[in-house]
Image (cartoon, grey):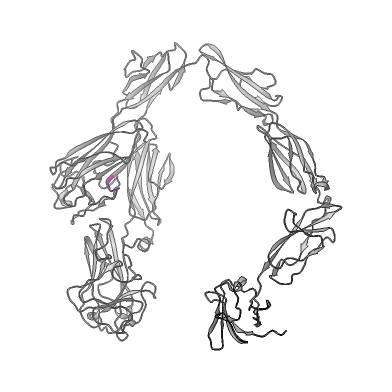
Amino acid sequence: MKYLIFILFLLFFKEVNSQNFINNGSFEYGGPGLGFWIDGAGYNYLAPPYSGSTSAGNYAFTTNPQELNNQFFVSGGDHTSGSGIMMIIDGTTTGGQQRFWKAGDNGGGICNLSIGQQYSFSYWIRTVSNSVNGNADLADIGVSFNNASNISLSYGTTLAPIPNFGWQQVKYTFTATNSCVNIEMFNNNTNAIGNDFALDDMRLSKAFVPLDFTFSLTHSNCSEINSGLIAMYPKGGVEPYTYRIIGAQAGIITNSTGIFENLAPDSYTIGLMDATGALDSIENVTINSISTIEIQPNDTSICPGQIVTLSANGGNGQFLWNSSNPFEAGFPNSNDSVIVNPTINTTYSVSSAVNNVNLIYNGDFEIGNDGFGTVYSFLAPSNPNGAQQAYGVLTNPSVWYPSFTNCLDHSLGDGTGKMLVVDGSTFNIGNDAFWCQLVAVEPNKDYLFTYWATSLTPSNLAQIQVKINDIELGFASVPNQNCSWGQVSYIWNSGSNTTAKICLYDMIYAGLGNDFAIDDISFRSQNNCENQLTISMASINPSFDVSYNLNNCLNIDTVYPILGPNFISGGFFNSIQTGLNINPITGVITTQNSLPGSYEVTYTAEVCSNFVPDTITMNLYAPPGFISLLGGDYNCSIQDFNPVLINVFGEPEFTIYYTINDSIQQISSLQSNISLGNEIGLYSLDSITDQFCSNTLTDEIEIFESNAPDIPNIVGDSIICINSTANTLQISNIQEGIRWYANSELSIFLGDNPSILPNNQESAMYYATHSVNGCEGLADSFYVHVTACSIVIPSAFTPNNDGENDNWDIYGLDSQYPENIVRVYNRWGELLYESLPGTYSSKPWDGKYKEANLPVGTYYYVIELSSQKEIEPINGIVSIILKNN
C-alpha cells in the first residue's frame, strides 16, 4: 500500500524557490537583448529623457509610467520592489498579433528544459492608462507556446486589470515536448484609447511535481543469506532526499543514497522524505531467501591418518562434491556424504544446482513504470507531439505515438503484455541513460545479461550501449525490421564487486527515426551455489594460539592469557623461571607475590597423542615511583629560586603529572632527576608513568614568595597624548631599591629613581624591579599608550625663513584624521594651497603661492577631515604676520 503526506506550504515553497529560466524577468538590467527580444511591427523604443507624451506602439523601461506620458498615464512603482524598473507599453494599433516580448536574448526561446516536464510561465501586468471606460479599452494579452503541449491558462485572465486594481498575476502551465520552447507575447487589442499597460517579473519555472518514487530489489543469494538489496529511485519533490527502511531485524536505517545493501530476508517498509518535509512510503517490500549450503564439519584440523566424513545440507537438497584443492586422485564426485583422508592441507567444494533466477526487478515491465531510474521523460498515456528523449510503458507503441509500428511485446505476445517504448534522445549530455537498475551480486562470479529489442521506425536505427558500473560491455543496433525482436547478450564477471549498476544508453542522436522498444531484460548468475571447507593437518610443533601482553605491571593485580580462535583447550600452564604466581589451569597470573622480571610461560597440550609445549614470553615490571622531592630555596647569586627537583625510579621515559597552585602540569624526561621549575607556589605530585607502567604520587613542596624581594606595583597614566606633558610613573608599594628597564630581558637600563618620566612621542612598555641586599626580584610591567588626542590649529605664523614658525603647522591632524585635506584661500576665494590626503604634516603651507611669498594679511582655510565628508569640516582664518625682533 502506498501513501503520501503533503506539507501544506509545499506548492508555495516550490513556486518561490524553484529556478527561474528567464533572464532579466524583472527588467532591472534593461531592454531587448537581455533575456528577451521585440520585433513586432509598430513597436518603437523610447529612450530617456522622456518628452511627457507617447504614441501608439511606444515602449520604454523605467520606474514610473507617468514620466512617459504625464497627461494620460497613472503614477506608480514597479511590481518587484516599488522602486525598480518595469516595461511600459503604449498599446499598438497595428494588427496581426505583433510580438512585443519573445523569450531568449534574440527571441529564439528558452533551452535546457526537460522533455515531459510540466512548467509554469507567469507575468505581472497592470493598466497604466487613466482613460479606461470598459473592458474594450483594456489590453488583451495573448501568449504563444511552441514545442509545448497541455497548455493551460491556470490563473488570471488575458485582459489587463482596470487601473484601480494595480498589479495582477497571470499564469500558464504547459508540458515541454522539446528541450527548447518558444514563448511569445502579443496584444490582441488595437484600440488607441486606454490600451496601455506595464509588465514586470516574468517567470518560467518547473511546475510542482508531487514527491514519488519507485524501487527495485535483489533477493538474498545462496552464498550469503544477508545479501539482499533495495534501491530507490525518486521522482518529483524537492532535493535533497532522506531515505529510510524499517525491518524487524534491521531496525530503522536511513541514508542519503537510497541504496541499502546486506539486508536479511524480511518484509520492509521503505520510504523517503524531501527537503520540504513531504513523505512517501511503500509497505511490505519483501526480500526472499535461497537456502544456503551448510557443511559439516566446518574448517577443521586433523591428525595424520585421521578419517573425516563430509556432509552438506540446505540449498535445494541436491549436492555435488566436485573438487578438491590440491587435486586428490580418486576424489568421489558424489551427491552423498563423502569420506576423506587427506595427508596435506586440502580444500573441498560442494555445489547445489539451484535455479539461477533473474535478478532484474520488473525486467518484463509487466508492473509498469516501476523499478528503474532514467533521465528520459515519462509521457503517459501518449506522446502525441513525438517528444524526443521520452518513453512510455504500454502494450502498443502506435497508441503512444501514431507513427510507430503496431507491435506486440516480447514476453507474452498476445496484445496484453507491456514493453518499454522509447523515442530516442537528440543530444548526449553524458549520462542520458534511458534505463538503469542496481542489483546485488556475489564477488568472483560470471553473470549473463540479456535484453530483447525491436525498432519501431525504419530510419536511424538505435544502437544500445550497455554499461555495468560505468564500464562498457558493448553496444548493438536494434533489428532493422520493425516489430522483429532480437536478443543481445553479454557475459560479465563481478570481480570484487558486490553491486552491479546496469545502464542502457541510446548512442544514436538523430531526430528522425531512432525509435525502439525494449523488453525482457535479464541478469542471471552463471554459477551454481557452492560452499567449501578446508581440512588442515595438525602441526607437530603447533602454536596453540595463546599469548600474553608482552609488558605488564605488578600493580594491575591480574594478567590474563589471550586465547585465540584456534586455541586448543585441556592443557596446562607453567613458568620456567621462579617468582611468577600463575594458575596452571587458567594461565591467570596474580601479581601479588610475583616478582618483577622477564618470564617464559609454557602451555602444554596433547596433539595427536603427543604432549607438545608452546612457549610465550612476557615481562613484569615494578611500577615507577619517586625517591626524593627537593629544592625551592632562594639563591641571590643567580637571582632566582633553586628549581624543585624530583628523583624517580622505573623504566624511562618518565612523565610526571603534578599541579602548581592547582594548575595541572606535566613534564617528560629520559633522566631520573627531573626539574619541575622554580615558579612560586605549591607543587603537588599526582602520578608518574614510565615506558610500561604508571603509579600515583602523594607528596608536595612549596616555594614561598616571601623569600624573594617584593614585586613592584607600577602606577601612572596608561594613555597620554602625543607631545603632551606626561606624568611620571610611580611605584606604589616600595620606596627604594627600584630599577627601571625598557625590555623584558632587563638588559636596557633606564634608571634607578623611584619614578620615571615616560616618552611622550611613542608607546612603550616599562619594567621595574626591586633589589634587596643586591638580590634583584621579579619585574612588574606597565604599558603607556601614546595617542593623538586633538588637533592644534595655530591662528598665525611668520614665514620669514628664520627657522622658527616658518610653516603653518597643524599638530595631530594627520595622525587623528588620515584622510584630511587642507585648502587655503585669499579674500577673493582664490585657492592658494591644497594638500594631498593625509600628508599635510609632510608638506605644510609655507605662506607662499606659486613659489612667491604672500603679503602679511588674513587668509581663509577649510580643513576636510574625511573623504566621505561624514565629519563636519573645520573653517577659519590664519594670519601671516611679521615677527618682532
Q: Residue furthest right?
A: 773
**Residue 651 place in picture, x, y as percent:** 69, 31
**Residue 327 place in picture, x, y as percent:** 35, 17
Taking the image as drawn, is residue 604 in sight? yes
Q: Nearer the viewer, residue 139 or 681?
A: 681
Q: Nearer the viewer, residue 207 or 80?
A: 80
Q: How many marks?
A: 0
Q: Is residue 37 above or below residue 582?
A: below
Instruction: Using the rendered view, name the quadrant where residue 874 is placed.
Output: bottom right
Residue interval drawn in magenta: 430-435
Q: Is residue 193 left or right of residue 807?
A: left
Q: Is residue 391 above or below residue 685?
A: below
Within the magenta stretch, is there residue 210?
Answer: no
Taking the image as drawn, is residue 586 in sight? no
**Residue 880 place in picture, x, y as percent:** 63, 84
**Residue 212 place in picture, x, y as percent:** 33, 52
Q: Nearer the viewer, residue 757 or 64?
A: 757
Q: Is residue 600 left or right of residue 224?
A: right
Q: Nearer the viewer, residue 463 or 402?
A: 463
Q: In the rendered image, which quarter contains the C terminus?
A: bottom right
Instruction: Using the rendered view, name the quadrant where residue 852 is placed.
Output: bottom right
Q: Is residue 154 above or below residue 612?
A: below
Instruction: Using the rendered view, name the quadrant where residue 44 is placed.
Output: bottom left
Q: Residue furthest bottom?
A: 828
Within the magenta stretch, is there residue 434?
Answer: yes
Residue found at x 18% / y 57%: 385
Residue found at x 60% / y 84%: 876
